[in-house]
Each structure stands twice: as structure tokens, then as C-alpha cells.
């Protein structure tokens, strides 16, 4: 192939790749930002940053995944990792400054929520869970991923996902027992 | 809720999850936020090749500057001559040929040429 034709071919492939990427961003950005928001504890700006970073990293792997389902699984794995990194950095900053860095204070979402206090209470309860339990709870019960999808995204066995879900529910029920009567009733439940 | 674990959920579990779904979610994003993310990603994609050539150019410039600063300055006057050549030239200038010392001072190749023409 002549060099000019080869260069045009590469450029066309680049354009196709970018178009596919923007379509992917369009299809997933709402869920990505919402999931990041829930995983990192309700900081909107940080959630946008985490999602953006995950999209940018996913762009590099577009050629590796021809099927959108594989690409989606891979993308959400990246997003989960980015959210973990954010939490680690935040914990480090808190330790360094010796005071909690409350990222939720400047969150514009707080003013829009019907009950900001309840939101903070729920965020704190999630924050007290072990990392694996928190992630599994968010992915399955809040984001609606299936157990199989969650296992693939987290790289864990299905049985591990189930047991973490069970433990997460048990801990949250105990932690939020005083929050609302329907939760308090029969909280001994399914053990 | 579409999970294969639904059979394990009690009504209390469902109420708890509903609490989270209703109260632990960000507000819907605005069109401006969506556009901002699109623009930011577009800018990053356009920048992804940029770091190579400016960095290389900057590195070359820095190396050239370092060489210019580190290498010794060139002398302002003419270069020093080799000692042997200087002596020959001095001998010519002083016309020492008359004493017969010049032949001995000439380099071998010059002497050979001299023999051919039998000067």
C-alpha cells in the first residue's frame, strides 16, 4: 500500500475509533458518573473526574474489545479502580491533615436532595462497610448489575459476591435500624 | 430488582435498598455538565500525541545549551602550530638553508620532492 493511502487508512481507523468512543461515552456517562458518585461517597466533582479518567483509559483499549459487552465490563472495572484510587487518596489526605476531608460539603447535589441529612447518613453507613461489601452492594442493588456482571467487573467468584452482598445487607440493616420503622422491623431477617 | 439473589431478599431488605435508591443518588446531570465532560474528553484525546515532539525539542535545546556552557571556549587567536612545522617555518624565515641545516629539518616527503627536482 502506498504511504499516502496507508496514512489515510490509519486516519480513517482513528476517526472510526473516536466515533465509537464518543458513542460509548454518550451511552454510559450517566451511569458512570452516578456509580462513581455512589462508590466514592457523594462528591459530584470527584465523580465527574473519576468517570472522565475511566473513559480516557478505556479509549486506549477500544481496539482490544470488538464486542461492546466486553468493553462495558472492562470499562466498569476501570471505573471501580479509579473510585478506589480516589478513596485511597482521600484517606491519605485525611491522615496527612489529621482531620476528615469532607468532600460532600461543596457538593451541589446536597442542596437539591429532599433530605441531605438522610443522604449523609446513608453515605456514612456505606462508608463503614468493608470495601468489597460496599462495591457489591452499589453495583448489584443500586446500579442493577447482575451477580454475574458484578463478579466479572470485580474479578471475583460468584459465591464471594453472594456472601459479600449478604454481609453488606446484614451490616446496613443493623447500622440503620433506627432510621426508619420498615427497616427496623424484623431486621434479624435472612441470616 | 433483576438479580438472581432476589429470593433471599426480605421485605425489610427491599425497604432498605429502596431507601438507598431514592436518597443516595446524585441529581440528574445538566446538559452543561454533559457537554463539559464531552469537551474535556475531546481535549484530552487531541492532546494524546502532543507530549512527544515538544518534549523532544525541549530536550534537544537543553542538551545544546548544556554543551555550549560546558565545553571550553575556543581561543580568540590563530591555532597553535605543531612544534616541528614552526621550526621549519622559522628556518625558512631565517634563511638557514645556506648552512645546510634546512634539508635535515624538512619532513621526509618534502625532502623526497626536493630530491626529484634536485633543488
Image: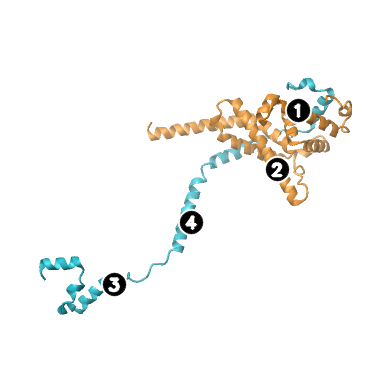
Is there one chain holding both mark 3 and mark 4?
Answer: yes
Instruction: Identify the chain drawn in orange.
Output: A
Foreground: disc 4 or disc 2: 2
Is there one chain holding both mark 2 and mark 1?
Answer: yes
How far apart are the alpha carbons under marks 3 and 4? 39 Å
Residue under circle 2?
A88
Labels 4 & 1 near each other (Cβ < 8 A): no
How far apart are the alpha carbons under marks 2 and 3? 73 Å
- For residue B83, the mark is 3
Mark sitting earlier along the chain (2/1):
2
Vertical position of residue B6 compared to residue B45: above or below: above
How far apart are the alpha carbons under marks 2 and 1? 24 Å
- The residue at 87%/32% (across/down) is A177
Assess disc 1: are there few (<14), some (14-19) or many (≥20) residues with their C-alpha within 10 Å of its C-alpha: few
Element class at badge 2: helix
Is residue B32 shown to the viewer in this render? no
Foreground: disc 4 or disc 1: 1
Instruction: Identify the chain drawn in cyan.
Output: B
Element class at badge 4: helix
Element class at badge 1: helix
Vertical position of residue A19 compared to residue B9: above or below: below
Residue under circle 1?
A163
Labels 4 & 2 near each other (Cβ < 8 A): no
**Numbered disc 1: what chain?**
A
Amino acid at each position: 500500500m502506498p504511504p499516502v493511502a496507508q496514512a489515510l487508512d490509519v486516519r480513517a481507523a482513528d476517526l472510526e475509533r473516536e466515533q465509537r468512543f464518543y458513542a460509548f461515552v454518550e451511552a454510559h456517562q450517566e451511569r458512570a458518573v452516578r456509580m462513581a458518585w455512589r462508590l466514592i461517597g457523594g462528591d459530584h466533582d470527584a465523580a465527574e473526574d473519576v468517570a472522565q479518567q475511566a473513559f480516557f483509559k478505556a479509549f486506549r483499549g477500544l481496539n482490544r474489545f470488538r464486542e461492546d459487552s466486553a468493553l462495558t465490563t472492562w470499562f466498569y472495572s476501570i471505573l471501580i479502580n479509579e473510585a478506589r484510587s480516589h478513596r485511597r487518596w482521600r484517606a491519605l489526605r485525611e491522615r496527612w491533615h489529621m482531620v476528615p476531608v469532607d468532600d460532600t460539603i461543596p457538593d451541589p447535589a446536597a442542596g437539591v436532595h429532599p433530605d441531605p441529612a438522610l443522604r449523609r447518613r446513608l453515605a456514612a453507613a456505606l462508608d463503614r462497610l468493608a470495601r468489597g461489601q460496599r462495591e457489591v452492594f452499589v453495583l448489584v442493588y443500586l446500579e442493577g448489575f447482575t451477580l454475574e456482571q458484578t463478579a466479572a467487573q470485580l474479578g471475583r467468584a460468584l459465591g464471594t459476591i453472594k456472601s459479600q452482598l449478604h454481609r453488606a445487607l446484614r451490616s446496613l440493616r443493623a447500622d440503620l435500624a433506627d432510621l426508619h420503622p420498615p427497616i427496623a422491623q424484623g431486621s434479624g431477617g435472612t441470616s | 430488582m433483576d438479580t438472581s439473589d432476589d429470593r433471599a431478599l426480605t421485605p425489610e431488605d427491599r425497604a432498605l435498598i429502596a431507601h438507598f435508591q431514592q436518597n443516595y443518588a446524585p441529581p440528574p446531570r445538566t446538559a452543561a455538565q454533559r457537554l463539559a465532560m464531552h469537551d474535556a474528553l475531546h481535549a484530552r484525546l487531541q492532546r494524546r500525541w502532543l507530549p512527544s515532539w515538544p518534549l523532544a525539542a525541549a530536550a534537544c535545546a537543553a542538551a545544546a545549551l548544556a554543551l555550549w556552557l560546558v565545553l571550553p571556549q575556543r581561543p580568540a587567536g590563530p591555532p597553535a602550530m605543531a612544534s616541528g612545522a614552526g621550526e621549519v617555518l622559522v628556518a625558512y624565515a631565517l634563511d638557514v638553508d645556506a648552512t645546510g641545516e634546512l634539508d635535515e629539518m624538512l619532513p621526509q616527503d618534502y625532502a623526497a620532492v626536493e630530491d626529484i627536482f634536485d633543488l
